[in-house]
Image (spheres, rainbow, N blue to C red):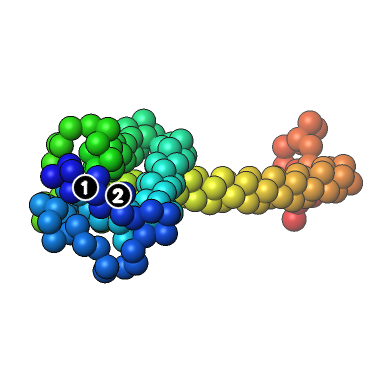
Amino acid sequence: QIKAAKTAIASGNLYGLGPGKSVQRHFLPQSSSDFIFAIIIEEYGLIGGLGVLSLYLLLLFRFVIAAHKANTLFGKLVVIGLGFPMIFQALTNMAVAVELLPVTGQTLPLISSGGSSIWMTCFALGIIINVTKKEEEIVQEQKEAALREEALQKLIDKQIQEDAMPIANLESENDADDFSISENPMAAVKNKL
């Protein structure tokens, strides 16, 4: 297996043989799953292999950003626990294809054909997207709550100022009207009428 993979990689050169023109995929067992990276290099060359590697590193970078942005510890752990093994699996598959590691049978996530592997990868990505979306919704709700609280506080301050103004005006009017009950208790009632 590994000899056919090395032959595929060596025949890829810099630009590859072209899409669908791989020769070794007919001789390499599990060429569509375990050794798909060798076939990618054969068809697309070193540039295609580095492109696939850079896409996985970009995905790793996005996982790190999503884990950093998560407000809760649970969100951080979910992103790390589901995202990093996916990248580790991809790097393991690539290392097996170039004979840095022994053959492990790991598929290349999102690229290899396979039933349960692609299902679990899609579930993991869906959960990660849901966590990041939920974190964004929580941040948005907190911003809206702060804006509502600020607007409510402004209304309360305005109402307090308006309520304070008539009291000051009434005090000045009450100075003109004498409703005191010092001499005769009925005088206050008479003056009010």
Q: Position of residue 146 (x, y in %)?
A: 56, 45
Relative vertical location of residue 2 with respect to residue 110 in this rendering, above or below: above
Which amino acid type corresponds to the residue marked 1 in the rendered image? Ala
Q: Are marks 1 and 2 in contact (CB under 8 Å)?
A: yes
Q: Is 185 on the left or on the right of 58, as rendered?
A: right
Screen quadrant of the N terminus: top left
In which quadrant of the rendered image does the C terminus lie? bottom right
Mark 2 = which residue?
Answer: 9
Q: Is residue 25 visible?
A: yes
The answer to which of 50 and 155 lies nearer the viewer is 50
Q: Nearer the viewer, residue 115 or 105?
A: 105
| Distance from the alpha carbon under mark 1 to that under mark 2 | 6 Å
The x, y position of residue 86, in whole percent, is 27, 42
The kind of secondary structure element at disc 1 is: helix
The label on residue 5 is 1
**Residue at horizontal 24 percent and vertical 45 percent from the top:** 6
The residue located at (34%, 55%) in the rendering is 12
Q: Amino acid at mark 2?
A: Ile
Q: Indicate whether 85 appears above or below 19.
A: above
Q: Nearer the viewer, residue 182 or 95?
A: 95
| Residue 27, percent from left and from top | 12, 56
